[in-house]
Image (tube, rainbow, N blue to C red):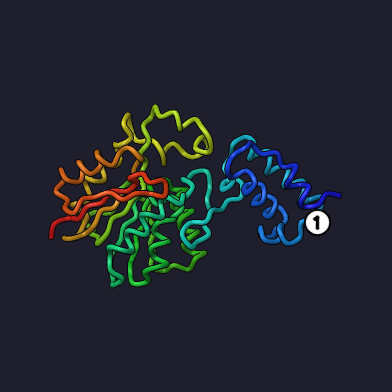
Amino acid sequence: MTIIASLLRAADLPDSPTARLDAELLLAAALGKSRSFLHTWPERIVPSEAALIFAEYLQRRRSGEPVAYILGQQGFWKLDLEVAPHTLIPRPDTELLVETALELAPATPAKVLDLGTGSGAIALALASERPAWQVTAVDRILEAVALAERNRQRLHLNNVTVLSSHWFSALKDHRYTLIISNPPYIACADPHLVAGDVRFEPASALVAGTDGLDDLRLIIAQAPGHLEAGGWLMLEHGYDQADAVRDLLLTQGFEEVHSRKDLGDHERISLGRLPC
């Protein structure tokens, strides 16, 4: 018979800052319990079925598969989201987009667009904080559209509409108070694409041409035709792309252009306002 404490000690995940956390999350899921249960009852016996599930989870994690994909869920903002391998795993740095949108856009009724929504993380976080906003979330990957819709329904956020669209292609002449996006922004030859958890994430959500700016260029060029006067465009980008993105925004006539730093002190998002 194996107890919780000994199973965790024997997990033998690759040495990393999150190894212990990963093991605890996987064991808690195998047991159908919370992480706090593991700490409260470290001497509890682990049923054989749960131990086998935990062993399978560990093997997948040792191969590099992200914990979020193994468990099929990831926390973002104040939400628990279903995730899957055809969408990007929501990351804490992307919460900077949510924080900035809530700061700059009023809580009064507004139309908001989330481009490339993936799991729906940004759109659903905004909708949960601003019930008066009508949020449209679009993605060109049909599996992502279905996933975002499942998350929307489970969270009972009726002020979100999820649509299939390649960026603005299905939106015709609709205009928005705020357009927000975490698009692909990695260069196709970037070595990070074959390292760590990123290996398991979809290239369609990561790669954007030889310099990583292809999708950012398109969004910035087309956004003025879909923004209300005085509306904001907010974009996540790579840690070394802020200068280029600000230049693109200025070239398209945006005002109040600036960047903001993420948790790692990198300029992670850039934004601009359409003239009134």
Instruction: Tell me which residue sits at (22%, 52%) in the image.
Output: 272
- Vertical comparison of 83 with 212: above or below: below
143 lies left or right of 275: right
> What element does badge 1 sit on?
loop
> Where is residue 169 drawn, in percent x and y?
28, 48
Q: Which of the 4 image quarters holds residue 274?
A: bottom left
Residue at image location 28% in from the left, 42% down from the top: 242
Residue at the extreme right: 1
Q: Which residue is mark 1?
A: 43
Q: Nearer the viewer, residue 73 or 263?
A: 263
Figure quadrant of the C terminus: bottom left
Q: Indicate the position of residue 138 as horizontal and vertical percent values.
A: 36, 53
Q: Residue, x 70% and y 38% (percent of image)?
A: 12
What amino acid is labelled 1 in the image? Glu
Q: Nearer the viewer, residue 238 or 275?
A: 238
Q: Residue furthest front?
A: 265
Q: Nearer the viewer, residue 218 or 197?
A: 197
